[in-house]
Amino acid sequence: MAKVYMCFTTDVIHEGHINIINEAGKYGEVIIGVLTDEAMVMFDRFPTISFEERVELIRKTPGVDKVVTQYTVMYDDVIAEIRPDYVIHGDNWLSGPTRAIRDNVEKLLQQYGGQIIDVPYTYNENVKHIDSKVKEKLAMPEFRRKRLRQLLKMRPVVKAIEVHSGLTGLIAEKTVVEHEGRLDQFDAMWISSLCDSTAKGKPDIELVDMTSRFRTIDDVTEVTTKPIIFDGDTGGLTEHFVYTVRSLEKMGVSAVIIEDKTGLKKNSLFGTEVEQTQDTIENFTAKIAAGKKVQLTDDFMIIARIESLILEQGMEDALTRARAYVKAGADGIMIHSRKKDPAEIVEFCDKFRAEDQVTPIVVVPSSFNTITEDELAAHGVNIVIYANQLTRSAFPAMEATAMDILRYHRAKEVDDRLMPIKDIISLIDTL
Ligand code: SPV
Ligand code: MG
């Protein structure tokens, strides 16, 4: 009997899946591969039920003869093992980044004469509604909040991109890229104090107050499902920080990063060019401990950011502080540097990892941008934050457009580099 293989990443079986399974049954034995969570989060949305539950769901579905595990996004291993005569899939993989998966399957099947069957993809009102319900669940605070901890277990390195609005949130949420046969997407979002302030035309000195920062979180959570790491600046007074922790937890934020500075905070990338004061270990550990004490869920993380390298206080100071902050309850350490050379970051990570193998390390490679995620991961880094690149790419593009409209007294000359009207009006999902 011929073997028909298909891979499922779904949490809910709807008429579109039934349709594909029925179609598959016409060709032979129906074998379904359930993609592991680790592989799924590389290009699809986060699963809302466990892998075991997904396997059970498929096993119970009429028309399915056999269920196997698919461990990788690309089909090499599973096709080598099963050697299906047919691989069947919705025809939505003919375009977009998942086309790379189809190409991979096509190449593998060609080696022995297997065939692809593209079934028209079902996307009617009913399927759309089910899809929205899954997204809604992922966006709920109790589901979103714990996702950073979940991703830390699944991803060799968790990648976060800066967001400061609904629109940038959508970019973080939806961008999936295929490069050299690999699919990738961002895991999380960073609500940067620098970019949140800049978007409001304000300096990054804790001038934009928490209420306003929380409104930015609302804008982002309204249209996204990915976890949020919030830039909490210094955390403010300990007496205020405890309230911030509660509010962030309630909103479904996964982590707050607070930096060990005090007084008038300035952006770290100014380094020692401006006056900045590092907090004492005593005060800062008390702030961390106070935050941990009021936290109500086990999901939320308070990450301590060390400014010793930024303020040229030396490696020993950074390591001493790291030890003290972890002891005070910090769930992670962020080490920052504004040097172009990543050497001091790497040195810190290696030394910290030699004594602590578990506490997550976070880095923000804005200045030391030559080092890759894989290289950082090899030195024990768990979270990489691209802290300001969306803002820094948008500003020059907008400024150039404004200049050219002034220059030519019409908009024709800028049109080629603009998003088509049709695309912008359909960018936002309608209900
Ligand atoms: C931010 O994005 O606001 C940060 C990171 O705090 S940095 O600007 O590099 O200090
Ligand atoms: Mg900041």
Image: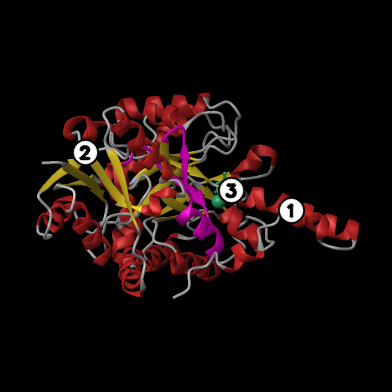
Q: Position of residue 426 (x, y in %)?
A: 55, 67
Q: Quarter of the image holding residue 401? A: bottom right
Return the disc, 2 or 3, that comes first in the chain's sequence: 2
Q: Position of residue 409 (x, y in %)?
A: 90, 62
| Relative horizontal placement of residue 430, taking residue 120 as reference (left or right) | right
Q: Type of residue at label 2?
A: Asp
Magenta-drawn segment: 155-181
Q: Position of residue 187 (x, y in %)?
A: 40, 48
Q: Is residue 111 above or below residue 394?
A: above
Residue at the location (40% across, 33% down)?
Answer: 320
Q: Residues within 10 Å of mark 1 (few under 14, many from 20)?
A: few
**Nearer to the camera, 218 or 36:** 36
Q: Which residue is mark 1?
A: 416
**Nearer to the camera, 116 or 302:** 116
Q: Which residue is mark 2?
A: 85
Q: Type of residue at label 1?
A: Asp
Q: Which residue is mark 3?
A: 388
Q: Nearer the viewer, mark 3 or mark 1?
A: 1
Q: Nearer the viewer, mark 2 or mark 3?
A: 2
Q: Is residue 288 above or below residue 131?
A: above
